[in-house]
């Protein structure tokens, strides 16, 4: 997938359809999984190619000036297609950048965690008690638990959730959007998130899945 995305974007950039920085709705890393971002990048890159071809054809046939409030009051058909190609190319680039950001974040978060344990839930086993807090939940683990290693594994698990997406993961607290983890004591960690709905979901999942 990435090779296809990259090839399309590079091909369009070489052809001169490279626009300046722009904000693409839905292209923030946290908006979707890396795969979904890559799929969106492919879709927008292909649409950019189509508009680029239409622009070239319109320029060749010498179609007259049109009128479009959004794209310019006196834009020709070729210019309209060029604008659309630039817009879709920017969207493709933004989605590709978001996918790459997720991949890099996962690589960084998981570098100290052995591959064989990255997918397993870190909170199954060592938890002694849980308590709801203002913005999440406080989790106490057994004495002797390597809390630093546990936090690292949790951060890796969260990064994997962000990269792979949360579809079908309706129980694990670490798949709640925006969840963060911090050690707050020798045997305590805190899971937090933002937004009333996410906080409530996090607390309910903690209580149901790992609560005492």
Image (tube, grey):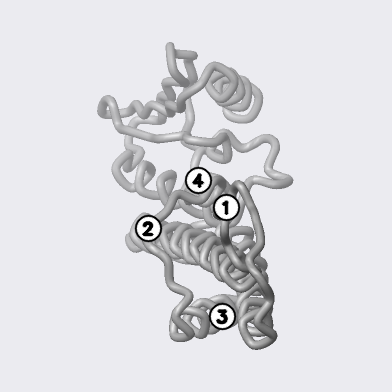
Q: In this view, does 29 lie above or below 180?
A: below
- Mark 1 and mark 4: span between their CA atoms? 37 Å
Q: Which of marks 1 and 4 is nearer the N terminus?
A: 4
Q: In this view, does 96 lie to the left or right of 55?
A: left
- Residue that numbered label 4 is attached to: 30
Q: Which residue lies furthest to the front in this view?
A: 64
Q: Which of marks 4 and 3 is in front?
A: 3
Q: Tell me the SS state at disc 2.
A: loop
Q: Is residue 16 above or below residue 201?
A: below
Which of 86/109 is in front?
Answer: 86
Q: Quadrant of the N terminus?
A: bottom right
Which of 126/121 is in front?
Answer: 121
Q: In this view, does 170 lie above or below 37?
A: above
- Residue that numbered label 1 is attached to: 73
- Does residue 182 appear anywhere in the picture? yes
Q: Tell me the SS state at disc 4.
A: helix
The percent position of residue 187, horizontal first and vertical second, equals 32, 28
Q: Tell me the SS state at disc 3.
A: helix
- Does residue 212 appear anywhere in the picture? no
User: Residue at point 57% right, 52% down?
Assistant: 73
Q: In this view, does 18 lie to the left or right of 170?
A: left
Disc assigned to residue 21: 2
Disc assigned to residue 181: none
- Mark 4 and mark 3: span between their CA atoms? 24 Å
Q: Quadrant of residue 211?
A: top right
Disc assigned to residue 8: 3
Q: Nearer the viewer, mark 4 or mark 2?
A: 2
The percent position of residue 162, horizontal first and vertical second, equals 52, 49
Q: Residues within 10 Å of mark 2 (few under 14, many from 20)?
A: few
């Amino acid at each position: 997938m990435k090779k296809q995305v990259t090839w399309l974007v590079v091909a369009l950039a070489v052809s001169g359809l490279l626009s300046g920085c722009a904000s693409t709705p839905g292209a923030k890393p946290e908006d979707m999984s890396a795969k979904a971002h890559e799929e969106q990048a492919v879709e927008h890159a292909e649409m950019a190619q189509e508009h680029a071809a239409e622009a070239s054809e319109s320029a060749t046939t010498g179609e007259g000036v049109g009128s479009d409030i959004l794209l310019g009051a006196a834009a020709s058909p070729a210019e309209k297609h060029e604008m659309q190609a630039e817009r879709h190319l920017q969207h493709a680039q933004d989605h590709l950048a978001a996918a790459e950001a997720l991949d890099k974040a996962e690589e960084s978060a998981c570098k100290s965690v052995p591959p064989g344990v990255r997918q397993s839930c870190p909170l199954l086993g060592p938890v002694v008690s849980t308590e709801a807090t203002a913005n999440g939940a406080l989790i106490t683990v057994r004495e002797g638990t390597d809390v630093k290693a546990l936090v690292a594994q949790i951060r890796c698990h969260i990064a994997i959730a962000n990269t792979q997406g949360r579809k079908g993961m309706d129980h694990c607290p670490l798949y709640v959007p925006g969840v963060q983890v911090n050690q707050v004591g020798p045997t305590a960690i805190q899971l937090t998130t933002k937004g009333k709905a996410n906080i409530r979901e996090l607390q309910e999942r903690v209580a149901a899945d790992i609560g005492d």
